[in-house]
Amino acid sequence: MSNNRLRHIDDGHVCFTYTDYRAHPGQAKKTMTLAAMEFIRRFLSHVLPLGFHRIRYYGFLAPRRRAAQLARCRHLLATLKPDATIAAVAASGDAAAAARREAARRCPVCHQGPMRVIGHLARPAWLHADPLDSS
């Protein structure tokens, strides 16, 4: 919280401004008055312990090089850009068949991204054995 949001402090109460994102745009700026101890409790709930750092965006999502890094990630993952995928389906002769092929390659759980088989695991021997007879 910056100092310019603090309005006044008197009789053990702190008055400050905040933005209510649920309100209509013209009514978003509001003022709140809290007891000093409650204000300090709420304020300190946002302070990180020693040794921790607040990271907003890091790595390939860092704002400075996001577009270039995402393009590199797509290249390394050997995927097409989203608009290129749409163009490829539209260019195919049978769009419905292309959509079915694409759906078959999607993850059956989350339905996000293509799924590639990279290998098969052999079933363990204990799965082939008969269950123990408990009678």
Image: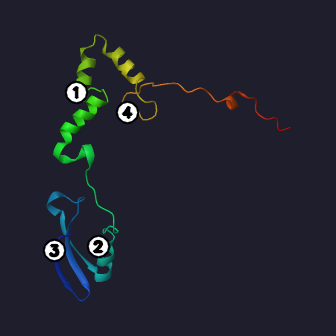
Q: Earlier in the sequence, mark 2 or mark 1?
A: 2
Disc 4 vs disc 3: Cβ atoms closer than 8 Å? no
Disc 3 vs disc 2: Cβ atoms closer than 8 Å? no
- Number of the label disc, if any, that sits on residue 15: none
Q: Which residue is mark 1?
A: 83
The residue depicted at 24 percent of the width and 33 percent of the height is 72
- Number of the label disc, if any, that sits on residue 112: 4
Q: Which residue is mark 2?
A: 43
The residue depicted at 36 percent of the width and 31 percent of the height is 113
Q: Earlier in the sequence, mark 1 or mark 3?
A: 3
Name the outermost residue toward the top: 93
Element under disc 1 = helix
Distance of label 1 from label 3 (alpha carbons): 46 Å
Q: Report x, y in % for residue 8.
A: 17, 81
Three-letter code, disc 4: Gln
The residue depicted at 62 percent of the width and 27 percent of the height is 123
Say how the picture is coloured: rainbow
Q: Report x, y in % for residue 85.
A: 27, 24
Q: Report x, y in % for residue 78.
A: 30, 26
Distance of label 1 from label 4 (alpha carbons): 16 Å
